[in-house]
Amino acid sequence: MKSKGKAANYKPAEDRKKDLRLAISRIEHGRANTKEAKLTIAAVAREAGVSTALIHNHYPAIAETIREKQGRSSRAMRDVKHQDLSAERQKSAGYRQEIDELKAKLASIASINEVLLEENRVLKAKLKDRSVVELVSSQPRR
């Protein structure tokens, strides 16, 4: 007499892996016993008669195969994110360089502005000095 419970559902890992691959194939070819039409981890689990947790925890390669077939491979997604991150880092480096250049230009302009303000103060002081006479042209303006 067979015992019920965990031991009754036990299958060797290779047999379970074969069952999962067959379930994937049946779903892909539209011959699923459970009438699953879309390939997902949950659909494969239902078709193979196991839990999704079993696939995630004990058969990560099968889970990755399913994701790849869905176009959501974690490796592919990671690579895309890595490329995006690299592109953003390059942009950021360019922006930092531009900021540094603008800060240098701003410092130069501020320095020139200070010189001009000082020259303006000197000229205003000379204009107020009574010994300085403003020259007016004797020729009529045209």
Image (cartoon, rainbow, N blue to C red):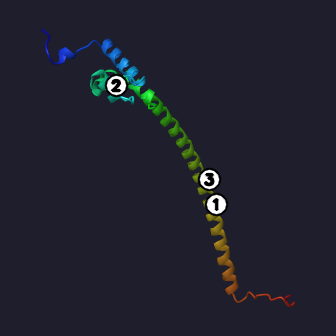
Q: Which quadrant would the N terminus be assigned to in this image?
A: top left
Viewer-side label of 1, 3: 3
Marks 1/3 in contact by CB < 8 Å: the verdict is no
Q: Is residue 52 above or below residue 17?
A: below
- The image position of residue 31, as x and y in percent, is 38, 22
Please give the label number shown on residue 108.
Answer: 1
Using residue 140 as the reference point, say whether residue 17 is left or right of it: left
Q: Which residue position holds label 3?
A: 101
Q: Residue at x 38, y 24 (%)?
A: 27
User: Which quadrant of the figure has residue 37?
Assistant: top left
Whichever of labels 2 and 1 marks the residue nearer the N terminus, that label is 2
Residue 6: give x, y in percent of width and height: 18, 18
Callout 2: SS: helix
Where residue 94 sits: x, y (%)?
Answer: 59, 46
**N-term mark: 1 or 3:** 3
Label 2 vs label 1: CA separation? 67 Å
Residue 113: image location, x then y, percent: 64, 68
Q: N-terminal of the two: label 2 or label 3?
A: 2
Q: Which residue is mark 2?
A: 44
Q: Nearer the viewer, mark 2 or mark 3?
A: 2
The kind of residue tagged 2 is: Val
Which corner quadrant of the image does residue 116 belong to? Answer: bottom right
